[in-house]
Every structure is written in C-alpha cells, then in structure tokens.
Amino acid sequence: MINFDEEIEKFQPSLEIEQAEDVITNNDLIDATDIIKDLLKEKRINSNN
Amino acid sequence: MICPNCESNVSEKRKRCERCGTDLQIYKKIYRSSNLYYNNGLARAKVRDLSGAVIALRKSLELNKFNTNARNLLGLVYYEMGETVAALSEWVISRHFQPVDNEANEYINRVQSNLTKLDSLNQAIKRYNTALNYAKQKSDDLAIIQLKKVVTLNPNFIRAYQLLALLLMKSGEKERARRYLQRAVRIDVNNTTTLRYLKELEEANAAGKDVEASNETDTGSRASIMPLSSYREDKPNIMAFVNLVIGVLIGIAVTAVLIIPTIKKNQTVDDKQDIDISYSIAQLEEKERQVKSLLGEIEELEQTNEQLRAKLDSIVIPEDKTIYYTPLFNAANAYMTEMTKTERNRDYGMLADMLSSIDESKLDKEAAVKLLAQMKEATYPKAARQYYKSGYSYYSDGKYNEALVDLKKAMDYDPGDVDAVYFLARSYHRMDDKDNAAVYYSIVVTDFPDSSRASDAARYLSQVQQQ
C-alpha cells in the first residue's frame, strides 16, 4: 500500500529554463578517463619521489 | 583516437601514444565500454524504455564524457520525457565538447527557433513546481488543476503524469489515475514509478473485485438453498413494448411539430401568391416614391457638400512660422558655443555661413531681426578676415579654385575689404579668366582709388584689357 505523503515527498521540483545556465556550469564532468589520468599522474609523482 | 594525456592523434592500432608514451589500452577499454552502454541505451530508447535508456547513457558518459552520440541521445530522451532543461543542458555540453559537425546544434536551434513552444514548455515546468508545492501543502485539488494544465502544455511530462495520478489515487479517483498512468506508460514503457502506481491500482482493483465476488458468492449460495416452491415464472419483458410505444409517440410528435407546419406553410404561400399581386404593385409604387424623395435628398446633400468644400478652400490656414525661427535658434546656439572658445579657436566662418542662410524677410518679430543683426555685426567682419586669410593661403599655394571660394565669401561678408577683391582678381588673372579678372580689377580701381592696391590693379587691368 502506498503512503501518499511519503510518495509526494519523493517528487523534486523541475528545473526551469532560467536555471539551465547553473545546471550546465555546475555539471560534474569528471569521467573514468579523468580519474585514471589522475591516478597515473599520482603514481608517476610517487615513483619519482 | 585522441590521446587523453597529450591530446594528439594516435592510430587506433597503437597501444601507446607515439608522442607522450601513455599506455592507451586501458583507455581503449573504457571507450569500448562507453560505446557498449551507448548501444544499450540506443536499443532501449528504440523500444521506448526511456528510463532504462537514461541509466545506460549516463553510464556511457561516466566512462567517456566526450561520447557525443551518447550525450545527444540522452538529451533527446530527456526531451521526450518532458525534461526540457536537462535536455538542453546535455546538448549545450555536447556542443561545448564538439562545436562542429554535431547534431546537438540542430536540436538546440530547433528548440530555440520555436519560441512559442519553448515558452509553453517553461510554463509547464513552472506550473508543475507550483502544483508540487500545493501537493506538499496538502492542497490536492489545486495541485490537480495545475497538473492537468501541465500535461496539456507538455503532453510528454512523465513526472507530471505520475504526480497527477498519485493525487487522483489519493482522492480515490482510481480510473482517472489509471488513464493518466497509461498515457505515461505509452511514453516511457518501463518507468518503475509509473509501473509501481499501476500495480498499486491493480491490487486495489483486485481487492475490490474479491469483495464483490465474495458478496456474489454469498448471494449465490443463499439462492441455491431457496426452497423449490419459490420458483416463479419469468415476468414478460414489458420494457420492449414500452420502448416501442415511446418510439411511436415520438414519431407522431415529430410529424405534428415539423412536417405538418411545413406542408401547411407551403400551401399558404401558394394561396397568398395570387392574392398578394395587387398588394405588391402598391408596395412597388410606394418604394418608387421613396426612391424619388431619397434622390432629392441626395441632390440637396451634394449641394451642401459643395458649398462646404468651397468654404473650406477659402479658409487660409495660418503659416507655421516657427520653422523660420529654427535656423535663427540654431545660429544663436552655435554663436554661444563659439563664444565659449578662445578667440583663436572660434569658427567665425561657420557662424557667418549659418547667419547668411537665414531668410530675414520671414522673421516678423522685431527682437529676432535685431538679434540677427547683432550677430551678423559681431561675426561678419571676423568671418571675412578668416576667409581672406584662408583664400590668400590657397592663392599662395597656387590653388586658385579654392582661393576663389574663400575670397568671394570674404568679399561678401566685408565688401570693404580691398585685399579680398584684389586677390579675387589676381586669382582669375592667374587662371587666365581675363573677363572676371577685369571685373574685379575694375572694382578695386573704381571703389578703392586711394588704397595701396589701386595702382597695381590699374596696371593689371590694362594688361588684361589689352590681351
């Protein structure tokens, strides 16, 4: 049986078009390639030390 | 492929970057996985499993953010689900990573070119947010009204359908809730929230049916234990007979109300046609009389019109004299501006040109005429001097055409300036225009006999006259 109040709380407001710029600016654009690059870089620095 | 470390182009077959030596195998694996997820997302999108497609495409982008195809498709899927802002964001990011040869450009242009649609989508979002607030404040009726408008404005807004269905379920309108959920399912077939709500409705429905079924079973069992003596013959179905009678009555009523009056009317018209001929002739005569009287009225009105037009033509509209004062005001304004400058920097020539262009005869105010005269008095001698200097300078440089223009102005603004007249004559003489040279030499000789230029002018005059 659904608890209606709990269910309504799960709904989030939708982003308005005026907020699109913020969404784009704050978008997390780190992918697996970036993470691997960072790891390899760290590894290289550690090995040099 | 592009090396993620140094961003140089590397052959697909290479295991290491030729430029920076980075091991590319792991990156190749990541890109392959990203493409696998993209293919998965595409397959799901094709069968309208939009929620599943979103998950797969997000995974694809988590592995390789430069996967433009995945990002563009994610945008499309969002757009189809009514998530306009999320869609636009993905396309803008896609364009950022790949500015040329990118379908995201086309998508963005299409959305932006239809401003009406964009506005209605934004309105839908705003109303959805308002409705959500109402729902959280337990104003379910207001929320339902808003959400109905939202799904009209954006018929693909999955979240709006879900919230609307949820509120309808809450208020006990299960059938309507089911209809909205089915519309949501047609857009996104595998949305877990939509399916969960539908399942809830089915369970509630099944429970309701169970109750009805148990009631029916009880009734059936009770019926089965009724004594045999309670047998009754079925009543004859009198409803069919009643319906037949009603049908016949309606038929009679239609005949009485619609058909008979029309027939009667037609008959009456035929009868009247004969009787009314004499009446029509009388009417025609009456109309003719009216036409004649109206024609008379028209003639009278035309005469009145001509008289009025003649009067109108005779009226002389007073001239708008303010336009004649505008050049004076402009000149006065320029004069005051020039006076704020130092003597050396004042452009008296420009002022004199402005003042000379004013038509004094059009000025009917004494003060204006006086002002014009004062300004001319203060300006003309100095303007003449300035023009003489520039004219003489042109003359010295051998630019006789330019010299003529300035020297003539110098002579106009100060007719007593013998130098200007003399060098006008000299300029014409140098240009071999003997006739004009003779005219101006004559003026010097005649009008300024005591000046220092007179003797030279006389000598040159005799020269040009001899030639």
Image (cartoon, coloured by chain):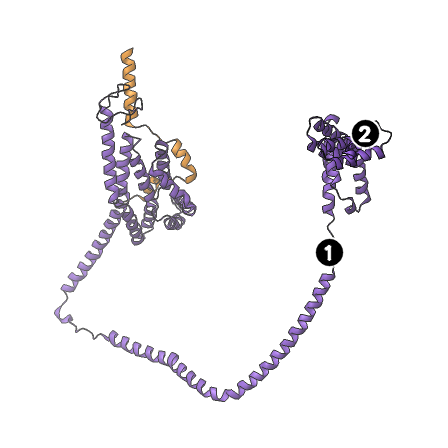
Chain colours: A orange, B purple
Which residue in the structure is indicated by mark 2? B459
Q: Amino acid at mark 2?
A: Arg
Against B133, is B205 above or below? below
Which residue is at a point 41% across and 44% down the rendered structure image?
B113
| Chain containing the residue with disc 2 | B
Residue B311 is situated, as x and y percent measured from the top left of the image, at: 73, 64
| Chain containing the residue with disc 1 | B
Q: Are marks 1 and 2 in contact (CB under 8 Å)?
A: no
For this orientation, the residue located farthest to the right is B450
Drawn side of residue B119 relative to residue B461, left or right: left
What number of labels is visible? 2
Residue B32 is situated, as x and y percent measured from the top left of the image, at: 23, 31
Which residue is at a point 30% across and 43% down the rendered structure image?
A3
Q: Which mark is residue B317?
A: 1
For this orientation, the residue located farthest to the left is B228
Residue B283 is situated, as x and y percent measured from the top left of the image, at: 56, 83
| Picture quadrant where residue B107 is located | top left
Element type where label 2 sits in the image: helix
Is B237 in front, or is A25? A25
Against B185, is B431 above or below? above
Which one is earlier in the sequence, the residue at label 1 or at label 2?
A: 1
Which residue is at a point 25% across and 77% down the rendered structure image?
B241
Q: How far apart, in angstroms, are the residues tagged by discs 1 and 2? A: 60 Å
